[in-house]
Image (tube, rainbow, N blue to C red):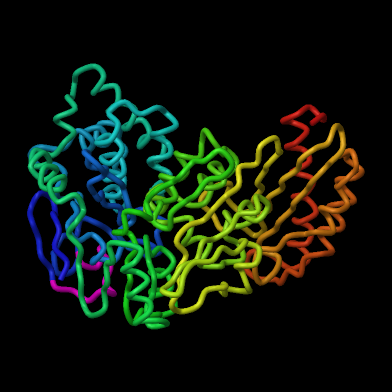
Amino acid sequence: MPAFWLNGQWTEVEVDPDRTLLEVIRGPLGLPGTKEGCGEGDCGACTVVIGSPEGSRVRYRAVTSCLVPAWSVHGRLVITVEGVGTPENLHPVQQALLRAHAVQCGYCTPGVVMSLLALFLDNPAPSDEEIRAALEGNLCRCTGYAPIRDAAESLRAGIAGGTWSREQVRPPWLGEVEEALREDGGRTRPEGDRWKSPGTPGEVDRLLAVLGSRATLVNGATDVQVARRVRGIRPEVWVDLSRVEALREVAIEEDRIRVGAAVRLEDLRRVLEPVLPPLAETIRTMCSRPVRHLATLVGNLVNASPVADTVPMLMVLDASVRIRGIRGSRVVPVSRFLKGYRTVDRAPDEWVEAVEIPRPAGAFLHFEKASRRRELDIASVNSALLVRWDGDRVAEARLAFGGVAPTTVLCPGAAERLRGRPWTREIAEEAAAIAASEVTPIGDVRGSAEYRRRLVHHLVLAHFRAWQESFGGAP
């Protein structure tokens, strides 16, 4: 039975492991302020704030509660809009929204309030870009984006100018709960017949040795929850890896980066910005920040979607996955780990412990994505390119595409056409034509097979233009 801090009160609730946090908040807990919109993490109406201990501090993250298993918040803090101010004494975030006329129909407003609360709890002086990023997951059906942004900026100005203090942004009960969270340190783990929370890699090994294919491994559960809602899939036993502290590490080494299985995408993006900017930018365009606060790199890879945005980058970087189980460990290149549509090289009693990414010293690395929206959308086709030079000629090239086959694929023929030649527009056109002939797309709602093949051609040229813009046409 999960138990957690809810708006300052210790709360226990007896629910099935399949229930989401949203379902529990609106159902047994009787708090209807959090709204249900898309049910797939896209609209932000159900956004709440989760506080969890990290070292000596408590981190606050805005998350889409429709994707969060209720059992996963055991021992943590959940803040809903009911815990933020009252009708008689509005919270500074609510006052700012009201004064900026940013409250229209009101359906999405609770989610906006929670996104801004998480932002200002962690950072009372966010930049314009940080404000935009904090709100990127909140769709406003009344097209009130400008007033919402104005409200956030006025709140920032109010804190800087003394209209509101930082303490006024913090709910009055927060200090007491933070102390309790720090004392526990995340050691409290829920256990049930259908929910397992291992605390060490060895415990994961032993669980999978017993459960095998009965186990569904989750971290953020973003893909599993959508599958449960859309296709009615019901895990027999949930195994939550998010409590394994050893899996939450990103190790930056001289020649490679090792990403643990429980590292959230948003945390990874921040770590990668100074050391591997192209992959950090790829992550930024994938989904909204509340979803990136839940999802992981390993989850994006193991899900084996043919349009997973990180996979083309991992392929051209020649990344590998470290797989382990009770029988030992093995390392498999990403290009061989993906066996087909939603199929990977992993036995039922094995699990992916980490992704190992070589650092591309001296190489040009670039990602492109063709989708209906520039950000927060699923790609029709995505692509990554890595190029190294020997003088003015291409010494090595790797080119990968997603959305054009049952899984992400490398295009060796196109890469070979570039190798040993100066990279001119003419050579780029030749490589683009070869790449288009190497893929085997199908048609669906995001585009016909011919449309996708043409996108492959255009994306190779987009990589070429990006290289020209970066280097002025010379490596």
366 part of magenta stretch: no
Residue at x-position 14% and y-position 31%: 168
- Please give the range of residues in magenta: 14-24
Please identify the quadrant where the N terminus is shown: bottom left
Residue 85 located left or right of residue 132? left
Q: Is residue 104 visible?
A: no
Q: Residue at x 74, y 53 (%)?
A: 399
Pick the residue in front: 58 or 255.
Answer: 255
The question of residue 19 being in magenta is answered with yes
Q: Residue 274: x percent and y percent?
A: 52, 33
Q: Position of residue 284 (x, y in %)?
A: 51, 44
Kindly indicate the quadrant of the structure image that contains residue 361.
top right
Up-down: is 225 above or below 42? below
Q: Quadrant of residue 13?
A: bottom left
Give me the residue at 29% from left, 42% from top. Answer: 103
Q: Is residue 54 visible?
A: yes
**Residue 347 to residue 174: above or below:** below
- How many marks the image carries: the answer is 0
Our reading of the magenta stretch's main secondary structure is loop
Identify the residue at image location x=43%, y=73%: 227
Q: Nearer the viewer, residue 424 or 302?
A: 302
Task: Please identify the quarter of the rendering in which residue 153 is found.
Answer: top left
Picture coordinates of residue 350, whole percent (x, y): 46, 73
Q: Is residue 286 left or right of residue 154?
A: right
